[in-house]
Structures are given as C-alpha cells and as structure tokens.
Image (spheres, helix red, strand yellow):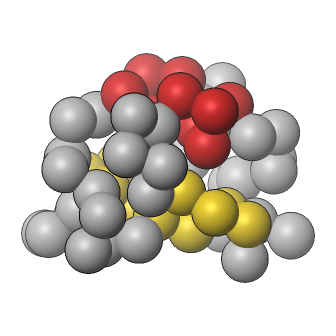
Amino acid sequence: MAYVINKDECISCGVCEGECPVGAISAGDDAYVIDADECLSCGACMDACPQEAISEE
C-alpha cells in the first residue's frame, strides 16, 4: 500500500515533502507526487497535509 496526492486538492505548499522520512515526495508539474517505490506507508504526509489531499491507494 502507498499513498497518493490528489492533484485537484493539492495546493503545492510542500508540507508533505518536509514530513516524509524517506524523501519519497517531490514537486511535480501541477502538484506534489509520491514515489510509490520509496513510500513506507507511514502516514506522516497524510497527517501533515492541510488540504487533506493525500489518501491511501
């Protein structure tokens, strides 16, 4: 299981990137993206997102 960012809800604030313990989140063209291969499914990004734009895949 991994997490995904809803591009329609993401405001590109970068909070999630700073919370990821393994650096699996980076800025994409329209929104931040999560590298599913690197994601530990710890939920830190989902808990930190002010827009609630991150969910389990």
Name the quadrant containing residue 54: bottom right
In the displayed structure image, the side of residue 5 where residue 15 appears, left or right: left
Asked if residue 42 lies left or right of residue 50, the reply is right
Residue 42, how many percent across, how many down?
82, 39
Image point 14% across, 69% down: which residue? 30
Left or right, residue 42 beside residue 35: right
| Residue 40 seen by the camera | yes
Image-based side of 49 in relation to 10, left or right? right
Image quadrant where residue 22 sits: top right
Vertical comparison of 27 with 57: above or below: above
Residue drawn at x 30%, y 72% as measured from the top left = 7
- Residue 3 image-quadrant placement: bottom right
Q: Nearer the viewer, residue 34 or 44?
A: 44
Residue that extends furthest to the left in the rendered view of this protein: 29
> Camera-side residue: 6 or 22?
6
In the image as oriented, which residue stretches furthest toward the front? 51
Picture coordinates of residue 39 (x, y %)? Answer: 71, 53
For the N terminus, which image quadrant? bottom right
> In the depicted view, which residue is nearer to us: 23 or 6?
6
Q: Residue at x 56, y 68 (%)?
A: 4
Whether residue 17 appears in this view of the structure is no
When the figure is inspected, residue 21 is found, relative to residue 32, above or below; the finding is above
* Number of marks drawn: 0
User: Which quadrant is the C terminus positioned in?
Assistant: bottom right
**Residue 11 x, y percent position in the rendering:** 19, 50
Q: Is residue 39 above or below residue 6?
A: above
